[in-house]
Image: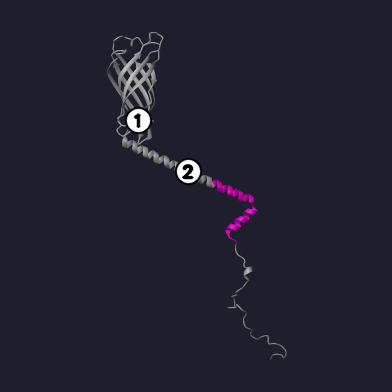
Amino acid sequence: MPMEGHADVSATFPPPPGHHGADTYIVQLPKDQVYRVPPRENALIVEQYRNPATAKKRRGGCCCCCSRRAFLTVALIVVAIVAVVGITLATLYFIFSPSGPKFTVSHVAVNRNKSSRAVPQYEVSLRARNPNEKLAIEYQDGDVSLLFDDTKVAEGKFPTLEQGRGEASEVTVELTGSSGALPRRMNGGDAAVDLKLEMKLAIRIRTAGLETWAMRSDVACEFKVSALGNDTRVLSQQCDTKFKQY
């Protein structure tokens, strides 16, 4: 029995707003009090301000990694280009199969000075032919030696020359004697003389206007002349050429 003047404490009250069960609650907060997790970029910025030395190290490491990547990329590109060029040149070499120039001796002249101490001068006229029908030849440098009885009697330089495909040229090589007078056996009047001409030539092959292979041509011409004078005739000869890539 309830007492007079007092409310009934056992009376049933309506549930509070938002109550949907014995253990479930919904908490509503004002919008300006909602706390969010900051994005990663902001966290990194805050960390940089807190630890500037660590951030500097990270930036330095990143730059170093970028530099290494750039260097490796450039190196790979260079290696790829070199490999492609090498494969292309090798393929073209087997396709064209370049051959060395062919030589024949056409004339030999000796300038004899009256003085026995004067050094004799030789002129050897050659016919050089490019046997390649699809390749041009450029003679860039060359050493020439004239031998008598396996002894060098004169030396000189091969002139620079360019030859087109299948072209033939007349070349004059000037040689300077290595002694003050002709050897006695060479100065035998009208007797025939056996001589040998050795040439080591640096040659560049051209195709489609582009320089391709650097070649070396070792030439040895053994020939016999009627006499060493103004009216010297070549009686016989044989020229061999060894043509190889540097």
User: 112 or 219: nearer the eye?
Assistant: 112
Residue 151 can be seen, yes or no: no
Q: Which residue is mark 2?
A: 74
| Relative vertical location of residue 5 with respect to residue 151 in this rendering, above or below | below
Q: Residues within 10 Å of mark 2 (few under 14, many from 20)?
A: few
Q: Which image quarter: residue 155?
A: top left
Could you tell me which quadrant the N terminus lies in?
A: bottom right
Q: Secondary structure at mark 1?
A: strand
Locate residue 40: give its quadrant. bottom right
Residue at horizontal 47 percent and vertical 42 percent from the top: 75
Queried whether the magenta region covers residue 54, the answer comes back as yes
Instruction: Identify the residue at the far top of this view.
Output: 115
Pointers 1 and 2 in contact (C-beta within 8 Å): no
Q: Amino acid at mark 2?
A: Val
Name the residue beneath numbered marker 1.
137
Read off the magenta span. 38-64
Residue 40 on the magenta segment: yes
- Residue 110 in sight from this viewpoint: yes
